Each structure stands twice: as structure tokens, then as C-alpha cells.
Image (cartoon, rainbow, N blue to C red):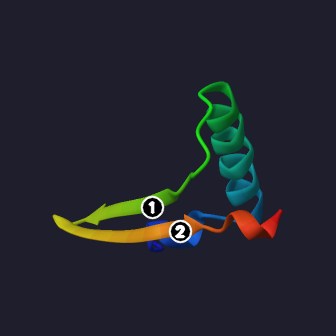
Amino acid sequence: MVHPFESITAAKRARMRRSASRHAIERSVRDVRIDVIAVIDGQIDHIEGAVDFSER
């Protein structure tokens, strides 16, 4: 079993950026941050700003 963070591929990051950008535009929001959370055996790992919007 791999760590859940390893399953976040470049294609998934691109889809998350597109989805978040559409959501922000529809709601007139300027700042968007995507965090990623993994729970393994009751332990929580959290990465703030895991998806970089400068990768566009």
C-alpha cells in the first residue's frame, strides 16, 4: 500500500486546479487554496496548499 499522497498525480493536480478555479470564478472568490488530508490508521497527515496554482 502506498501513502495516499503518492496517488496525487500531475493529472489529478491539474483537474483539482481547474475545478477550484471554476468554483472560485462562479462564486467571485479571489484566493483559493487546496489542502490534502490523509488518514492512515487513525493518524492524520495534512498538507496546506498542496496543489500549487502557479503550475498552470
Q: Which residue is mark 1?
A: 36
Task: Name the residue rendered at 44%, 73% in the picture.
Answer: 3
Left or right, residue 10 beside residue 5:
right
Q: Give, as a three-letter code, the residue at label 1.
A: Val
Asked if residue 52 lies left or right of residue 5, the reply is: right
**Residue projecting furthest to the top:** 26
User: Which of these two is toward me, 55 or 13?
Assistant: 55
- Residue 20 is situated, as x and y percent measured from the top left of the image, at 63, 43
Quadrant of residue 42 within the rendered picture: bottom left
Circles 2 and 1 in contact, beta carbons < 8 Å: yes
Of 33 and 36, the residue lying toward us:
33
Which residue carries the number 2 mark? 50
Q: Which residue type does callout 2 highlight?
A: Ala
Say above or below: 20 vs 41: above
Residue at figure coordinates x 74%, y 44% from the top left: 18
The label on residue 9 is: none
Other-residue count near label 2 (Cα within 10 Å), few / some / many at <14 / 14–19 / ≥20: some
Q: Position of residue 26 (x, y in %)?
A: 66, 25
Give the Cα separation between the discs numbered 2 and 1.
6 Å
What quarter of the picture does the N terminus occupy? bottom left
On-image quarter of the C terminus: bottom right
The spot of residue 43 in percent (x, y) is 19, 70
Q: Quadrant of residue 19?
A: top right
Residue at 53%, 57% in the rendered image: 33
Reply above or below: 39 against 6.
above
Which type of secondary structure does the marked residue at label 1 adopt?
strand
Q: Residue at x 34, y 69 (%)?
A: 46
